[in-house]
């Protein structure tokens, strides 16, 4: 029996290393509703946001070198889908500090 649940994933302290902000699980599909990215260190940054397809290392960029102002919040509100073991990742271009909030609908298949 299929189920649906609205969920949120919170990730604090994203820096210039790849951070997985949503990890998919086999047998699930995820409708990403919004991604909020907030710079918390008082310095302008740029970030990449991408989907790691099936956690296999092939990245598909949603944003590449996207500007994020000091103490600002970037809102992504276009919906997209992750399937199975896809991963949503974010990395800053330099050492910094951002928090990420991902709202999504988790559907079991």
Image (cartoon, rainbow, N blue to C red):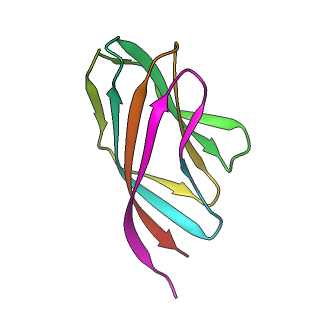
Q: Residue placed at 39% from the left, 71% from the top?
A: 5
Residue 88 magenta = no
Q: Residue 4 appears at what percent x and percent y?
A: 41, 75
Nearer to me, 66 or 5: 5
User: Is 90 situated above or below 69?
Assistant: below
26 displayed left or right of 91: right
Q: Residue 17 appears at what percent x and percent y?
A: 60, 25
Q: Residue placed at 46% from the left, 22% from the top?
A: 47
Q: Residue furthest bottom?
A: 1
Helix, strand or loop: magenta stretch:
strand
Q: Residue 19 appears at what percent x and percent y?
A: 57, 35
Residue 8 magenta = yes
Q: Residue furthest right?
A: 56
Q: Residue 102 appears at what percent x and percent y?
A: 39, 47
Tell me the magenta residue range: 1-21
User: Is 88 situated above or below 3?
Assistant: above
Residue 65 seen anywhere in this rendered image of the structure: no
């Amino acid at each position: 029996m299929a189920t649906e649940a609205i969920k949120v994933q919170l990730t604090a302290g994203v820096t210039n290393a790849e951070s997985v902000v949503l990890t998919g699980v086999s047998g699930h599909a995820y409708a990403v509703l919004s991604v909020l990215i907030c710079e918390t260190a008082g310095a302008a940054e740029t970030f990449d946001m991408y989907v790691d397809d099936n956690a296999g290392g092939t990245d598909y960029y949603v944003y590449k070198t996207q500007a994020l102002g000091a103490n600002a919040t970037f809102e992504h509100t276009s919906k997209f889908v992750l399937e199975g073991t896809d991963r949503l990742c974010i990395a800053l271009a330099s050492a910094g500090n951002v928090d990420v909030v991902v709202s999504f609908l988790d559907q079991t298949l």
